Amino acid sequence: MSNQEKQLQIIRDVVLQTDVNARYDLYFTDSRVAIIYMGKIDRYNNELFQTRSYPSTSTAVSPPMAYVDSRTAEVKAVEEELNHMPLDQIMRLSKKNSDYSYNEIEEFQLFWGEEPELAILSTDYETAIGLNQEQFKQLLEFITGYEPLSDKLVVSGNWKQLKEILNGVPKKAEPQTTPNNEEAKCGTCGSKNKKDAQFCEQCGAKLAKEQEK
């Protein structure tokens, strides 16, 4: 990693879909995103996500794992140490670590739902990452606010909920609709909308207008 490379954002405790029994952190710099292995977890434990392991920062050939309780002073100390390490050095701590340069990334695909997801797509590779809702919002805010990446972002999911997230409006209970003959059907997802709606409330697609007689 060049001395000029600047760390911009860290999203902690994401789930790599090809390695669901481990935990990863996403490191965003001004030139790449790195997927950093942070050890195994016990997904059958009632205290899910409360135990995490960290790769030792020692130079041993097979560095031991240091197990600590999440968010304790020890965890914060380890995270602080990693924050000050060059990313190239962190990358060497595990063979499971990987990265994408921004030049090779074609799209960041964010999906909003009960189980939010991030997909990183390049010409040759695709990485699927499971998120929680807070991580989704952190990524959405970071990527949309960082110009080199904002044009690569594609967002999908429940359009009405996404609009509330983008506008910072708390979600409200939806009134029950009654069937009628004045509903506009979306040609993309099939959802029904108000007759005068211009865009589908579910997928955001533009609604086709019926020809006037």
Image: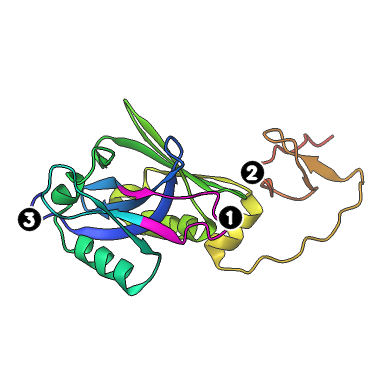
Q: Is residue 84 left or right of residue 139?
A: left
Labels in figure, total: 3
Indicate the quadrant where residue 8 lies: bottom left
SS for tag 3? loop
* Mark 1, other Cα within 10 Å: few <14 / some 14–19 / many ≥20: many
Q: Are marks 3 and 2 in contact (CB under 8 Å)?
A: no
Residue 165 or residue 20, whichever sits in front = 20
**Position above or below: 123 against 37:** above
Query: In the rendered image, which residue does mark 2 sit on?
Result: 203
Q: Amino acid at mark 1?
A: Leu
- Can you say whether 156 is above or below 176 in the image? above
State the CA–CA distance, disc 1 to disc 2.
Answer: 10 Å
Q: Residue at x 43, y 59 (%)?
A: 51
- Looking at the rendered image, the disc whose residue lies closer to the viewer, 3 or 2, is 3
The correct choice, above or below, for 68 with respect to 98 in the image is below
Q: Residue 72 in the image: state x and y as whole percent.
A: 37, 72
Per the rendered image, the range of residues in magenta is 37-52
Residue 91: image x %, image y %? Answer: 20, 45
Query: Answer yes or no: do the residues labelled 1 and 2 have beta carbons within 8 Å?
Result: no
Q: CA distance from mark 3 to mark 1?
A: 38 Å
